[in-house]
Image: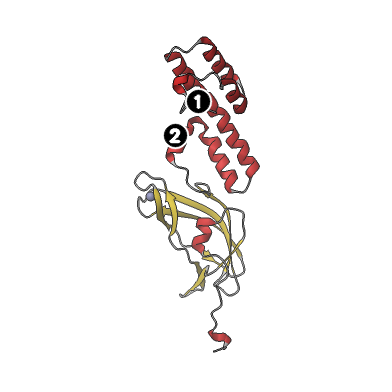
């Protein structure tokens, strides 16, 4: 009963699949079942790369799909090796994901370590295409913010998001001015809106428009930008 041989040793380390799907670049992680010794005339060690699950934003997919590795990667016990590996969506066969990483197979020739240098498209949750459309010209700032956030760089993310919000302000106010003119709002109202438009800070702009939003634009009696 107590024979230690019969007690299964819990596996330590992440799976290769989880590494590609979930680990952000720059982290050195222990991996279980990383390699396998291949039988043949010469000794070689293959990296065990399964299909991984990622979000595919191709029109035909628009969801989580399996991505297949396109190459066989070789490992060397105790030696660090650099890799560049592509995965392609099994469903649409169009979307591609590329990883740059290094590996080190342990002396046991099974487990090891992996670390990503980077990946493209960048690491992180998918951004809905509708959101991207709404953001318009601020797309790049938004995606940079998203990337900074995913890498734990909260303050950098905030700077990018703030830029997105400040720039959206002008678009929103322009829409309100357009409607205000259409419904023949008093001149003071459009003057206030134009003043708000030139405010650099979103919060101050909201303060300026507070009383200047035409009644027909109030949502349930409330200012839509307040
Ligand atoms: Zn696809």
Query: Can the viewer see residue 168 in this picture?
Result: yes
Q: Which residue is mark 2?
A: 133
In the picture, the disc for residue 98 is none
Quadrant into which the C terminus falls:
top right
Q: Which one is closest to the eye, mark 2 or mark 1?
A: 1
Q: Earlier in the sequence, mark 2 or mark 1?
A: 2
Cβ atoms at labels 2 and 1 below 8 Å apart: no
Residue 220, horizontal then vertical, whole percent: 46, 28
**From the viewer's perspective, is residue 185 above or below residue 130?**
above
What residue is at 51 percent from the left and 20 percent from the top?
213
Residue 222, horizontal then vertical, whole percent: 50, 27
**From the viewer's perspective, is residue 40 above or below residue 5?**
above
Q: Is mark 2 within 8 Å of ligand 1?
A: no
Quadrant into which the N terminus falls:
bottom right
Q: Dot 2 lies on which element?
A: helix
Residue 10, horizontal then vertical, whole percent: 55, 74
Q: Dot 1 lies on which element?
A: helix
Q: Which residue is mark 1?
A: 172
What is the CA distance from the residue labelled 2 to the residue labelled 1?
15 Å
Query: Can the viewer see residue 84 in this picture?
Result: no
In the image, taking residue 87 as reference, residue 4 lies left or right, namely: right
What residue is at 61 percent from the left and 54 percent from the top?
26
Residue 158, horizontal then vertical, whole percent: 62, 39
Most extreme residue toward the top is 187
**From the viewer's perspective, is residue 172 above or below residue 97?**
above
* Crowding near the residue tagged with mark 1, few <14, some 14–19, many ≥20 C-alpha atoms within 10 Å: few
Front residue of this view, candidates 79 and 156: 156
In the image, taking residue 136 as reference, residue 61 lies left or right, namely: left
In the image, taking residue 43 as reference, residue 91 lies left or right, namely: left
In the image, taking residue 182 as reference, residue 28 lies left or right, namely: right
């Amino acid at each position: 009963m107590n024979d230690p041989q019969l007690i299964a040793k819990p596996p330590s380390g992440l799976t290769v699949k989880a590494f590609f799907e979930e680990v952000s670049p720059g982290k050195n992680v222990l991996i279980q079942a990383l390699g396998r010794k291949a039988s043949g005339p010469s000794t070689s060690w293959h990296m065990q790369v399964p299909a991984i699950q990622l979000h595919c934003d191709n029109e035909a997919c628009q969801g989580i799909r399996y991505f297949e590795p396109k190459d066989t990667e070789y490992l060397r016990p105790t030696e660090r090796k650099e890799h560049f590996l592509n995965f392609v969506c099994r469903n649409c066969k169009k979307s591609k994901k590329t990883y740059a990483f290094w590996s080190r197979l342990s002396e046991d020739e099974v487990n090891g370590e992996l670390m990503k240098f980077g990946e493209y498209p960048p690491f992180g949750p998918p951004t809905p295409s509708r959101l991207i459309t709404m953001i318009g010209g601020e797309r790049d700032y938004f995606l940079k913010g998203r990337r900074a956030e995913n890498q734990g760089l909260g303050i950098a993310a905030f700077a990018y998001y703030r830029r997105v919000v400040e720039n959206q302000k002008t678009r929103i106010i322009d829409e309100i001015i357009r409607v205000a003119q259409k419904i023949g709002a008093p001149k003071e109202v459009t003057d206030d809106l134009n003043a708000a438009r030139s405010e650099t800070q979103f919060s101050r702009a909201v303060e300026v428009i507070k009383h200047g939003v035409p009644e027909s634009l109030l949502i349930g009696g409330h200012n839509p930008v307040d």
